[in-house]
Image (spheres, helix red, strand yellow):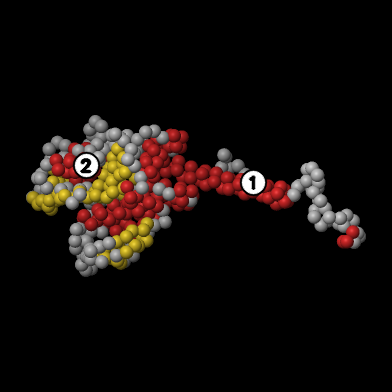
Amino acid sequence: MNRHARKKDFDVHRTLAQGAPRAHSLRAKNVPLDDTAETKPAASGGHGFWFYLKRLVIGLVLLIFVGAITIGVWDAIELSQASKKMFGSGNLFSLFLGTNLASQNGRTNILLAGYSADDPGHAGANLTDSIMLISLDKNTKTGYLLSIPRDLYVQIPGGSYSKINALYEQGQANGFSAPGYPSGGMGLLEQTVSNSLGVPINYYALIDYAAFRDTVNAVGGVDVTINSPDGRLYDPNRDWTTGGPLVDLSNGTHHLNGQQALDLARARGDPSPYGYAVGFEQSDYQRTADQRMLLVAVRAKAVSWKSVINPTRAGHLFDGMANNVKTDINTSNVMPLYGLIDKIKISQLKSYSLNKIDDKTLLNPYTSYYSGDSLIPAAGIDDFSAIQAAISQLNQ
């Protein structure tokens, strides 16, 4: 349908057939009312109540159809523009036709990394302080989110060591390139995660903080439930957009807008001149748990027909993602990935931290001149065997 084509004007009088008899019309101007004959439907070709009701219903159906087409055209325009920004192509044919997702025995793994490159005044803006493995199984319709601590001390291909959150920055600076991996920082991070955890990575997505904030706003905010042993989560560090504390949430359910959700995703109870934190005794572990909770909350709102058919919301959602996400997912992967995520119920999307899986502690604190305060496998530096075995169990 040509979105520039003009719609025909709707004329209410067209619902009346030309020349149709009227129920109380007079045969002549001066004929008394009691002499008027009651008009009866013609034996053939007459138009009674059911005829007009049928036309009204057909008209309403057409109106709804035109509205749906209008929304579809709006979404198509927004989606094409967003697709071009994010995937390098606005071709909606490849977007909607789709191809099979890369996987191993039906399991697709996506490496998600978050940084603050959108905030040039932020120290360490190119450090990926949020790293998560998203694993989805199309055969069992299950999946899990696995947070990888930013302070994990790992060996980089080539022999040197680093905290894992610095790999993206190093890969960008050194022009990382290796067969089978993306070039640059995400390639180095992907290769290291794959080697350390013993899992193949099929796709990556690098997301800045603005994408998360804008996405939450685009879906109308998210609901989260706080259940802290301390009765609340309180991080006194400042949210400079409001002037208040970064997080101040009592136990219970709260509806968060984009900025509030972003503040919760950032908070880990760092020392502050404004007071003492409450509920952040686990520091970065608490933060990564909150990040997984928020991601599940976004998934619950974003993978919804209401988000897709609302043109304003869909447009903001597409733009929010396209302007702030870098990925090697291509246009033909989008619909199969959407379909896979949509089929996995929230109850079947589990949440884990690499520190502890099934109550087994897998990481220990470690401090050295080179690593500073970091984390290493409980079995020792470079010994990821127990971690790989735990992840293998998750994949069963």
Residue 393 is marked as: 2
Q: CA separation, marks 2 and 1? A: 57 Å
Residue 107, image x, y percentages: 30, 38
Report the front residue among 105 and 166: 105
Name which quarter of the figure residue 123 lies in: bottom left
Q: Which quadrant of the figure has residue 379? A: top left
Badge 1 amino acid: Ile
The location of residue 276, given as percent across then percent down, is: 20, 67
| Residue 198 shows up from this direction | yes
* Circle 2: element type: helix
Label 2 or label 1, whichever lies nearer to me, is 2
Tell me the SS state at disc 1.
Answer: helix
Instruction: Say if mark 2 contacts mark 1, CB within 8 Å.
Output: no
Location of residue 205 in the rendering, given as x and y in whole percent from the top left corner = 31, 43
For label 1, the residue is 58
Residue 273 visible in image: no
Which image quarter is the C terminus in?
A: top left
125 and 294: which one is in front?
294
